């Protein structure tokens, strides 16, 4: 398949923000793609070479390096390329313009295939060590020299990590279902395979090679992260028991980091909730898994909490986040070792347990774990009584937990990979008339700062996730709660996600000064949830022409690096919080804005 075919689709994708149109364009593209190229086409369309969790080297070429390669390929002075770049702010356009000014290609010259481009990218990504930058420039130069101007645009955007076509995973799954099975309804079957493997390329290849039957047989694979099951939220213990069919198993909700541990013989990998491979940051957890998981192969899940090595007391979440670093890992490990509290068993020695009920999974977990102080199974209470649940909750809070995750014990209590399901309901401290509980929001834009904040941002535009529409909806502007240090690092931290215009998956009425691709998630606490005509969260849901907003929001100091944008608080949760407030405070108290 020619790279130009792929690039033509990119161009079309860029011209729309409508999901249905994007799907049609992708279907057309997939129909033209040979099964052997399909995997590459999918990764490339997502702007990468592999699923994020593989740990394989990715591209991430610096703009300076890219500029040098364009200059060499086009035979133009580097200064001129820099001027082009300054003019458009887009390295892709700069490359396209530079290459257009070059002589026209003569007939018979080689045309790039998708495989050529992927292979060249792979070699560039894998260059390392002394002199690697120069070798990258050389490889990139020769790739650009073989490309048409339009191809150069997308090659440059891809290598610099700036290819943002706004195509979500679910849109790709829709398109695969239509292209290969002629029915969008089969999307759910594909989605389950994706949820089990977190690898769209793998799912696509399997579909192309062995059809829907092959997809139905996909099982959990040790080494490929399973997309994690998440909990719904309710504030009333009685309601929770009702919702779960009259009985449940309540588990302590630890305030740490979710670990999905994959053990294959002597090899252990740990994945975070956003499916990053975080193994290297937690050598202590690797060792614990090797020592206390009594089977050859297993996939288990739990929450890792930083512990005081002297007192064995649990430390707050922020302490654990200090373990997320590139350097000084051993030193930090000694200072704050982790305790792993296990709550799931998804796979044992060739047996996929994701479709087994809760009680079976918990029983199997007990069988395969040799519990110790630092590696143990999370406390649980099976009950059907509200009072017992309330007492257990208070106990959890006293022990330093966030609350409970209350789980269904019914026949259908499978592990719903990738879903925020009603089989799990979290119970945190109650909603009083105030918003006592922080929420996690994603940064989608910013406003210029003035005075003391000149040069940084005055406020950030924050959004919640709407899974039904697969978009992010704004819910507040946050300006307070940032320390001077936070303010200093914000522009740098957000730089890679900067865009000229609103991201296609961001739904906003406000015009931000700067827009970002949704990526960074922070924790925000406000005083209450109010109706607001300027924010798009729950727009027209409670009242016509109003959305919901967080009033007096402030940053709590927690950078939720463990959460992906899709893990941020959902629009539905904010609606529930608003409704819960209505029950406890007089109406006029919350409606003003
Ligand atoms: P939240 O981050 O508020 O949506 O709560 C869900 C998170 O709670 C999960 O992703 C886990 O990281 C964490 N958690 C802590 N204890 C448990 C537990 N016993 N069962 C499930 N999740 C838990």
Image (cartoon, rainbow, N blue to C red):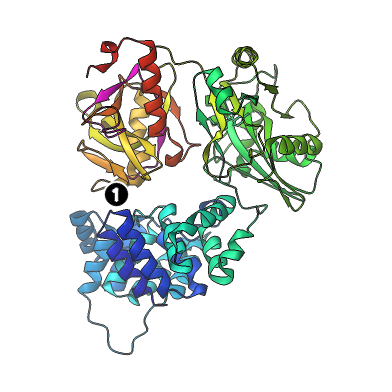
Q: Quadrant of the C terminus?
A: top left
Give the residue at x 40% y 55%: 171
Magenta-span inclusion, residue 530: yes
Residue 336, percent from left and from top = 63, 26
In this view of the protein, can residue 204 be seen by the observer?
yes
Q: Residues within 10 Å of mark 1 (few under 14, many from 20)?
A: some
Q: Quarter of the image for the N terminus: give it.
A: bottom left
Question: Who's the residue at 78% across and 28% down the image?
Answer: 372
Q: Is residue 392 above or below residue 168?
A: above
Seen from the viewer's position, the closer of residues 70 and 17 is 17
Left or right of residue 179: residue 344: right
Location of residue 197 with respect to 391 vertically, above or below: below
* Range covered by the magenta-colored residues: 516-541
Residue drawn at point x = 47 percent, y = 68 percent: 180
- Depth check: give the residue in front, 298 or 583: 583
**View quadrant of ligand 1:** top right
Residue 484 spot, x, y in % from top left: 34, 24
Residue 131 can be seen, yes or no: no
Q: Quadrant of residue 538?
A: top left
Residue drawn at the location 23% of the way across and 47% of the way down: 501
- Is residue 256 located in the magenta-colored stretch of the structure? no
Could you tell whether 174 is left or right of 244 in the image? left
Q: Quadrant of residue 228?
A: top right
Disc 1 is placed on an element classified as loop
The residue tagged 1 is 504
């Amino acid at each position: 398949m020619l790279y130009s075919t792929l690039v033509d689709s990119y161009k079309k994708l860029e011209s729309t923000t409508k999901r249905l149109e994007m799907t049609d364009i992708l279907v057309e593209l997939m129909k033209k793609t040979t099964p052997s190229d399909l995997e590459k086409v999918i990764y490339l369309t997502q702007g990468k070479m592999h699923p994020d969790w593989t740990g394989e080297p990715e591209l991430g070429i610096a703009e300076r390096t890219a500029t040098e390669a364009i200059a060499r390929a086009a035979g133009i002075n580097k200064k001129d390329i820099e001027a082009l770049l300054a003019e458009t702010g887009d390295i892709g356009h700069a490359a396209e313009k530079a290459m257009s000014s070059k002589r026209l290609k003569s007939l018979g010259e080689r045309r790039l295939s998708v495989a050529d481009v992927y292979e060249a990218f792979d070699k560039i990504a894998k260059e390392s060590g002394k002199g690697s930058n120069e070798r990258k420039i050389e490889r990139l130069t020769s790739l650009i020299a073989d490309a048409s101007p339009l191809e150069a645009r997308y090659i440059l955007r891809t290598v610099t990590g700036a290819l943002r076509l706004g195509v979500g995973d679910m849109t790709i799954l829709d398109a695969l279902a239509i292209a290969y099975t002629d029915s969008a309804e089969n999307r759910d079957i594909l989605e389950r395979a994706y949820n089990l493997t977190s690898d769209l390329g793998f799912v696509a290849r399997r579909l192309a090679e062995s059809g829907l039957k092959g997809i139905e047989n996909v099982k959990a694979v040790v080494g490929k992260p399973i997309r994690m099951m998440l909990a719904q939220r309710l504030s009333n213990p009685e309601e929770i028991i009702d919702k779960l069919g009259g009985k449940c198993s309540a588990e302590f909700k630890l305030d740490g980091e979710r670990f999905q541990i994959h053990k294959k013989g002597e090899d252990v990998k740990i994945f975070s909730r956003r499916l990053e491979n975080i193994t290297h940051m937690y050598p202590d957890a690797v060792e614990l898994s090797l020592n206390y998981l009594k089977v050859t192969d297993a996939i288990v899940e739990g929450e890792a909490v930083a512990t005081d090595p002297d007192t064995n007391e649990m430390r707050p979440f922020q302490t654990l986040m200090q373990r997320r670093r590139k350097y000084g890992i051993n030193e930090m490990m000694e200072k704050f070792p982790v305790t792993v509290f296990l709550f799931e068993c998804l796979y044992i020695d060739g047996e996929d347990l994701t479709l087994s009920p809760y009680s079976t999974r918990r029983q199997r977990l007990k069988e395969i774990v040799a519990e110790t102080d630092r590696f143990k199974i999370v406390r649980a209470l099976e009950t059907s009584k509200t009072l017992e649940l309330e007492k257990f909750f208070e106990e959890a809070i006293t022990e330093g937990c966030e609350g409970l995750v209350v789980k269904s014990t019914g026949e259908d209590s499978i592990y719903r990979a990738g879903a925020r399901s009603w089989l799990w309901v979290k119970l945190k401290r109650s909603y009083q008339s105030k918003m006592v509980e922080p929420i996690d929001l994603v940064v989608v834009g910013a406003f210029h700062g003035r005075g003391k904040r000149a040069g940084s941002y005055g406020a950030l535009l924050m959004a919640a996730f709407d899974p039904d529409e697969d978009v992010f909806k704004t819910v507040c502007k946050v300006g307070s709660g940032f320390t001077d240090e936070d303010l200093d690092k914000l522009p740098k931290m957000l730089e890679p996600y900067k865009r000229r215009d609103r991201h296609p998956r961001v739904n906003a009425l406000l015009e931000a000064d700067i827009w970002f691709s949704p990526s960074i998630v922070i924790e925000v606490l406000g005083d209450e949830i109010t109706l607001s005509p300027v924010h798009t969260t729950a727009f027209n849901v409670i009242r016509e022409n109003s959305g919901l907003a967080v009033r007096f929001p402030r940053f709590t100091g927690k950078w939720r690096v463990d959460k992906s944008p899709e893990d941020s608080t959902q629009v539905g949760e904010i609606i529930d919080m608003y409704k819960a407030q209505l029950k406890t405070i007089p109406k006029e108290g919350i409606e003003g804005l």
